[in-house]
Image: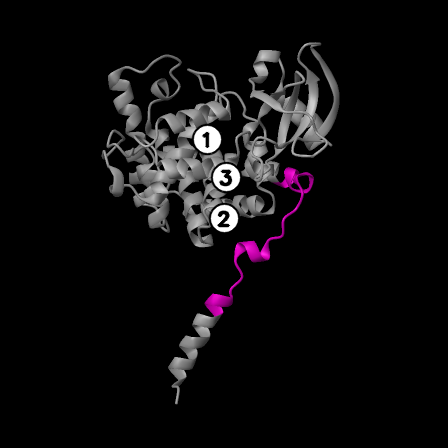
Amino acid sequence: MSSESDISDSFTMSAKVMAPTRKDRIKPVSLSKEIHNAQHLYREARELQQRAFQGIAKGNPIDVAEFQRCADGIIDSLFRNQDALLCISRMREKDAYLLEHSVNVAILITIFARYLKLDDATIEQLATGALLHDIGKIQVPNAILNKPGRLTETEFAEMRKHVVYSRDILMKSEGISAVSLDVAANHHERLDGNGYPQGLKDHQISLHARMIAIVDTYDAITATRVYKDGQTGIKALKILRKDSPSHFDSDLVTQFIGAVGMYPPGTLVKLESQKLALVLENNPAKLACPLVKVFYHCKQRHYLNPVTLDLAAKNCNEKIESAVDPAEYNIDINKFFNDFILNA
């Protein structure tokens, strides 16, 4: 005969099994329905970063719970429609790298973790750690952090310390998880042992640290900073491929490409017809054929009435020639995005 404790334990285990996952309780929506909410969430995440940096400068502790709530909002949005926040994250502002980078990495690692089918708790801890992974940069002198030219060896050594600063800040923060701490402390470790700060190698680097190494590098390559112009997503993916398996896990890089696509939403592409288009949505079945908004003719150098085009459609003869830099055509991609996507 079963005891009361056995029955209670059985009920508890059953409840855990039956608890709805994020995927169960969140229903997908269209890009147009999620885009404004995504913009609001992105703005809130940036503001949280700003407050945290200001608080640390004053000696205040990190409110981990606030970052966890922010991570939850981001994850929910990505489960509703991952292309919305991914698109918003590509509309970068000049001189905002420090605030935007960690938000972008949180978005990317959530998409990556979801693609890998990691559990809800792990995804939340990864996103929280990503939001906090560069928090130690507030202790790096601004003259080094924002230097427009190449850093000296001494300056680079100081810049590298931001990982240690982040780790130390988070170790003192109440409520930080082991996963969140891991990604913050080890996002610059590399498989060949040439990373920092510990020079970890191969099996010493966890799955989570391998993941954030990829997404952190990808966002850094595609961002415009004081000392360099951003490169296209395709170029960033080629660099990740080239540096695998020496720096990055080859299998994970392949999985990451599947997660974000060859031309992530927000990418400006040139079609073979010499028209420019903004990528709106990925097509998981055909990574080279996303949904795009055509709006400019390269040869004639004039804007067109924006038209949405599904490059995977059977009757579509358009193909992507390459990803391009908006500056090449003197296009303010942020203005186009605001005028024709957010205000559509």
In terms of secondary structure, where does tag 3 sit?
Answer: helix
Which residue does the numbered mark 3 point to in the structure image? 259
Q: Is residue 88 left or right of residue 258?
A: right
What is the magenta segment's predominant secondary structure?
helix
Say whether residue 50 is visible.
yes
| Amino acid at circle 1 | His
Q: Point out the residue furthest to the right here.
A: 305
| Amino acid at circle 3 | Ala
Q: Is residue 277 left or right of residue 51?
A: right
Dot 1 crowding, Cα within 10 Å, few <14, some 14–19, many 20+: many
Q: Position of residue 228 (x, y in %)?
A: 44, 16
Question: Dividing the image into 4 quarters, which one contains the N terminus?
Answer: bottom left
Decide which of 296, 19 is in the foreground and name it. Answer: 296
Q: Is residue 51 left or right of residue 199?
A: right
The structure residue drawn at horizontal position 43% and vertical position 36%, both measured from the top left corner, is 254
The structure residue drawn at horizontal position 60% and vertical position 37%, both measured from the top left corner, is 283
Q: Quadrant of residue 227?
A: top left
- Asked if residue 27 lies in the magenta stretch, the reply is yes
Dot 2 crowding, Cα within 10 Å, few <14, some 14–19, many 20+: few
In the image, which is nearer the foreground, mark 1 or mark 3? 3
On residue 69, the disc is: 2
Which residue does the numbered mark 1 point to in the structure image? 101
What's the magenta region? 15-37
In the image, which is nearer the foreground, mark 2 or mark 3? 3
Q: Position of residue 294 (x, y in %)?
A: 69, 24
Marks 2 and 1, how far apart at CA: 18 Å
The structure residue drawn at horizontal position 70% and vertical position 34%, both measured from the top left corner, is 314
